[in-house]
Image (cartoon, rainbow, N blue to C red):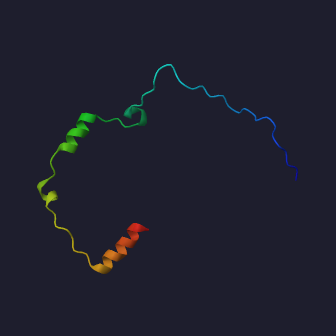
Amino acid sequence: MNTQTLISPAITCNFTVAPEESIFADSRDYGFDFDEEEVGSELLAPLPAGLADQPIPEVGADDFERIFHYFIS
């Protein structure tokens, strides 16, 4: 097997950097076409009354350990 040492590196690409004006990304550029005001008002809406006071389910020690191992794996 022959080994060759590259004496001068080959230039494979020529990048142009620093455009004239700054580039700003918009959410619509990535396919997220939604109204920020509408989403904000939905996030500020109060939770339904039944959802806020749900009881915490009782879980046995063996079930908890089994589920916890699934969670950390």
Identity of the residue drawn at 31% across and 77% down: 63
Residue that appears at 47% across and 20% down: 21
> Which of 30/68 is in front?
68
Q: In the orientation shown, which residue stands out farthest toward the top? A: 20
In x, y percent, where is residue 41? Answer: 20, 39
Query: Is residue 16 shown above or below 50?
Result: above
Q: Position of residue 31 (x, y in %)?
A: 40, 37
Residue 31, compared with residue 16, is above or below; it is: below
| Rendered residue at 27%/79% (across/down) | 60
Q: Residue furthest front?
A: 7
Determine the image quadrant of residue 61: bottom left
Q: Toward the viewer: 52 or 65? A: 65
In this rendering, position of residue 39 left or right of residue 25: left
Residue 6 is left or right of residue 24, and the answer is right
Quadrant where the C terminus is found in the figure: bottom left
Question: In this rendering, would 66 be left or right of 8?
Answer: left
Task: Classify residue 69 by image quadrant.
Answer: bottom left
Above or below: residue 6 compared with residue 18: below
Q: Quadrant of residue 45?
A: top left
Count of marks placed on residues: 0
62 or 29, which is in the foreground? 62
Q: In the rendered view, does 12 fall on the left or right side of 40?
A: right
Picture residue at 39% right of the left edge, 31% below the top: 26
Q: Position of residue 19 (x, y in %)?
A: 52, 22
- In this view, the residue farthest toward the left is 49
Where does residue 39 sit, x and y in percent of width and height? 25, 39
Of the pair 37 and 65, the residue shown nearer to us = 65
